[in-house]
Amino acid sequence: MFETFFKNYTFQSPLMNASGVHCMTIEELDEMADSKAGTFVTKSVTRQKRQGNPEPRYYGTPLGSINSMGLPNLGFDYYLDYVSKRQKTVSQPIFFSVASMSMEENIETLKKLEDSDFQGFTELNLSCPNVAGKPQVAYDFDLTENILTEVFSFFTKPLGVKLPPYFDIAHFDQMATILNQFPLAFVNSINSVGNGLIIDPEKEQVVIKPKEGFGGIGGQYIKPVALANVRVFYTRLNPSIQIIGTGGIVSGQDAFEHLLCGASMLQIGTQLYKEGTSVFARILAELEVIMKAKGYTNIEQFRGKLKTIE
Ligand code: RRO
C-alpha cells in the first residue's frame, strides 16, 4: 500500500528520518534500519569530526522545535565505513548527507564519495542555518549554481540537494531555473526555517545557548512553508528530479498533504526527535486510515494531484 518509487528503487514506505535526527551514531542508524521507515539518511557529514555548538542547543515546544546544533558529527570516515559495511548485506540504498565548512571541503568530500564503493543516494546539504559566520548556501543563487556546476563536472552517482525554504515567487522561479540545468536525482524541501527565536516568557530568556538563542525552527510551525516549497518544485522541476518533502509531518494527514503536493519521500525530524522511531509505524497507520476512507490502494493514485479552485 505504501510502496514508493524513487529513481530505480522501490521503498516499502515513503517515510524516513530528516538528517540530523536519530542518525549520529551506528546505534541510532541501526534503529532507523529496524523501524518502519522505508530508508534513512545519515547526519550531515564534514571531513573531520565536529563537536558542534554548546548546549542547550535543541528545545522542543508543543508546536515544534528550535535547534542550533552546529553540525556535530563523527566525521566522513565513520559514516562511509557504516554504509560500506551495510551495503554488503542489504541491497536497499540509504542516503548520505554531506555538508561542509567551505566549497573546497564540499568538493573534496564528494570526490571521496565518488571514488568510494558507496552505492546509495547523496544528499548535499546547502541549507545549514546554524554555523556562525556561514550563511545558508542556497540563499546565494550564484554560489549554488557554481557549486552544482563544479559537483556535476565529476560526480556521477545519484545526488540531490537539501534546500532552505524560499518565500517569494521570484525566488522560487530563479531557483527552479538553476536546478533544472543539472542532472539532480532529487530536491529535498525544506530544511528548518533558519534563525527563528523561541523564548521562555517566565525566565524572560532565550531557550538555546548558541547564537544568542537564534536557531532553525521545525515541526508544526513550518508545515505550510514546507508544503508550498514542495508544491513549487514539484510543478517547476524536470519530472526526472523527484521531491522529498520535509517539514511539519506529525500525523498521517500531514504525510498525505505532502504527498498530494508531489513529494515521493517524506522526512521527519522534530517529531522523530520527540517520539522515537515508533513514529513511523504510527504515521503509516494514520495514513492508511485516510487512504482507505478515500478508496486509495496506493500512493501514486493521489501523489501530486493537489487541486486548485477554478
Ligand atoms: O547541525 C545543525 O545545526 C543543523 C543542520 Br547541519 C541543518 O542542516 N539543519 C538544522 O536545522 N540544524
Image (cartoon, rainbow, N blue to C red):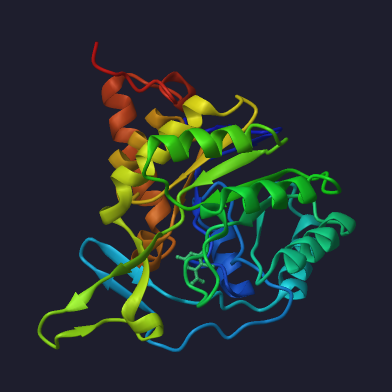
- Image coordinates for residue 58, horizontal then vertical, percent: 37, 77
Picture quadrant where residue 47 is located: bottom right
- Image coordinates for residue 91, horizontal then vertical, percent: 75, 47
Q: Is residue 98 left or right of residue 209?
A: right
Q: Is residue 26 above or below residue 99?
A: below
- Image coordinates for residue 36, horizontal then vertical, percent: 49, 51
Residue drawn at 29 percent across, 21 percent down = 294
Single out the residue that lies furthest toward the left. 202
Q: Is residue 85 above or below residue 237?
A: below
Q: Nearer the viewer, residue 42 or 163?
A: 163
Q: Nearer the viewer, residue 147 or 255?
A: 147
Q: Nearer the viewer, residue 217 or 290?
A: 217
Q: Is residue 230 above or below residue 86?
A: above
The C terminus: image quadrant: top left
Residue drawn at 52 percent across, 75 percent down = 131
Q: Is residue 209 left or right of residue 49?
A: left
Picture quadrant where residue 277 is located: bottom left
Q: Residue 66: in sight, yes or no?
A: yes
Q: Nearer the viewer, residue 86 or 240?
A: 240
Q: Residue 2: in sight, yes or no?
A: no
Residue drawn at 55 percent across, 53 percent down = 138
